[in-house]
Image (spheres, helix red, strand yellow):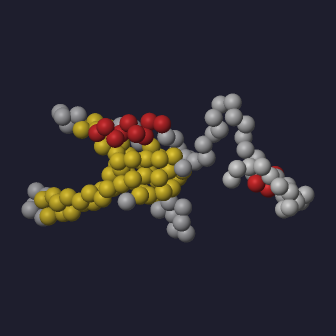
Amino acid sequence: MEIEGKVKLIGETQTFGSNGFRKRELVVTTDEQYPQHIMIEFVQDKCDLLNSYAVGQDVKVSINLRGREWTNPQGQIKYFNSIQGWRIENLSQQAPAPGMPPVPPMEAFEPADNLNEEDHDDLPF
């Protein structure tokens, strides 16, 4: 599954327990009639995927839904869901490569009006 939207928040990496479990949270705001603020967890080595992203970027996040059962001290069973990210892609406009001039928008080009369909060209295709 995938979620697309704008990065609203990138949390710091948190470490838990003696085994060093790592978790980092990302909040993405969807672009729809009723925008949703979706919190996505990145765990263990996937935490580092967020290092090159910033608030305000448009992203596409590949996710898995996770569910678990927990029994509280009173013996009641509770269920919890989480959204776990495993890949993130930048959808924001990429800056042109160094040394490459920016490409003007299509509106900047005038249509050619001096075409002669009868002119023979020597292109082999």
Q: From the viewer's perspective, is 19 left or right of 22?
A: left
Does 92 appear above or below 117? above
**Front residue of 50 and 62:** 62
Please give the name of the residue rendered at 48% of the width and 36% of the height, measured from the top-left corner: 52
Please give the name of the residue rendered at 43% of the width and 47% of the height, measured from the top-left corner: 88
Does 52 appear above or below 90? above
Q: Is residue 29 visible?
A: no
**Front residue of 40 and 91:** 91
Q: Is residue 66 visible?
A: yes
- Which residue occupies the extreme top position in the image? 99
For the N terminus, which image quadrant? bottom left
The picture places residue 121, in percent across and down from the top left corner, at 80, 52
Q: From the viewer's perspective, is 108 left or right of 59?
A: right
Q: From the viewer's perspective, is 79 left or right of 34?
A: left
- Which residue occupies the extreme right position in the image? 114
The picture places residue 8, in percent across and down from the top left corner, at 50, 50
Please give the name of the residue rendered at 34% of the width and 41% of the height, measured from the top-left corner: 46
Does 26 appear above or below 29? above
Q: How many marks?
A: 0
**Front residue of 35 and 111:** 111
The picture places residue 81, in percent across and down from the top left corner, at 27, 60
The picture places residue 34, in percent across and down from the top left corner, at 52, 68
